[in-house]
Amino acid sequence: MVEQKSEQYIVRYGSVRLLGLFTSRLRGNAHRGDDVIVRTKRGTEWGEVLCVATERAIGFLESPQVEGRILRFPTAEDYETKDECQAKEESEFVEAGRLIKECKLPMQLVDVEHLFGGELLVVYFVAEKRVDFRELVKVLKAELKIRIVMRHIGVRDEALLLADYGDCGKPVCCNTHLTEKPPVSMKMAKVQKASLDPNKISGRCGRLKCCLRYEYDTYQEFKRELPQIGAEVVTREGQGKVVSHEIISRQVVVVYEDRRRIVTSLQDIVSVIKKKPGAKKKSAKPAEQQTTLTETESDSAESSSVPAERDKTGN
């Protein structure tokens, strides 16, 4: 008997759209978009195949370790079970909200996730401070007869769970293709000459839109090629001063000596005869004068920039 070859696939699963590497011994190949039943560390779950696990695809995952195994393609009974789980989630959400109010806990219920296999109920919530929810877990477990995991999430994760469409008219990025949420700053909006009105550049989570990060590196690269604002340049039109940038088109606005104001392409600049007034080159500090973090300070800085997030499980 010939042993069936074990394939590997990238699968998306869970309410927060987790990605993982899964092995499979399915009869027949799985394709992008196929629904599958998978076994993960949490239990039996519903998943969606994204692609075959090539070396390049695995490189995009946070961890190259195998997350679990694809059990089978779903049957008609599995689809009925999935609908039953969704119906249970609605009633469990209402019950969890009621118990949170009764316990008078300073937390806001966001969503609940009932695993396909029925082994676990994940309760997602937001709170400004740490919450002692041990008593709540006991009551929930007694009422719902299922193992409970409480998950404290941030406002961006709340948008991932609840948001639908963004201002652009398309599904929100965090609920479609984004696997990470990189930091976004007002500096990115300024460089791209976007509106600085928070109401116009904030996403459904109330934070700066993730899409401001997409082209920032390109803007930075193009900006480095352009003369600084205030620099004196010589172009085919004569000599003038750079007063503003058109970064994405690689152009600058130059005011000439005769007060003409002309948008000039980078290739039309013959030379930069005077850099921005007051601009000085940064001199490197001698080795003995350079300050470095101690081992303790380095560890502290790293831990403060990435806050730990813990799950509490009631057994």
Image (cartoon, helix red, strand yellow):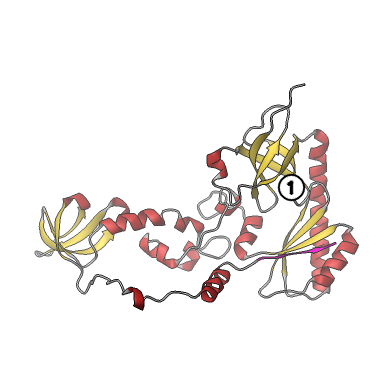
Left or right for 119, reference 204: right
Residue at the outermost bottom position: 289
Please identify the quadrant where the N terminus is shown.
Answer: top right
Query: Which residue carries the number 1 mark?
Result: 40
For numbered disc 1, what is the local secondary structure? loop
Residue 229, picture quadrant: bottom left
Is residue 254 visible from the viewing direction of this image? yes
Q: Which residue is drawn at 80% across and 38% down?
A: 78
Q: What stretch is highlighted in magenta?
A: 309-315
Give the x, y percent position of residue 248.
Answer: 32, 53
Task: Please indicate whether residue 136 sits to the left or right of residue 62 in the image.
Answer: right
Circle 1 packing at 10 Å, graded few (<14), some (14-19), many (20+), is some
Figure check: 50 above or below 241: above
Q: Residue furthest top?
A: 1
Position of residue 235 measured from the top left corner of the image (x, y, whole percent): 13, 55
Q: Position of residue 67 (x, y in %)?
A: 69, 47
Residue 310 is covered by the magenta coloring: yes
- Point 23% across, 58% down: residue: 252
* In the foreground, 138 or 197: 138
Residue at position x 77%, y 74% from top?
132
- Tally the numbered discs: 1
Looking at the image, can residue 246 be seen? no
Is 6 above or below relative to 143? above
Name the amino acid, label 1. Thr
Quadrant in which residue 217 is drawn: bottom left
Q: Give above or below for 223 relative to 118.
A: below
Residue at 76% of width from left, 46% of height from top?
45
Instruction: Check the image and name the residue furthest to the front.
Output: 288
* Magenta segment includes 21: no
The C terminus lies in quadrant: bottom right
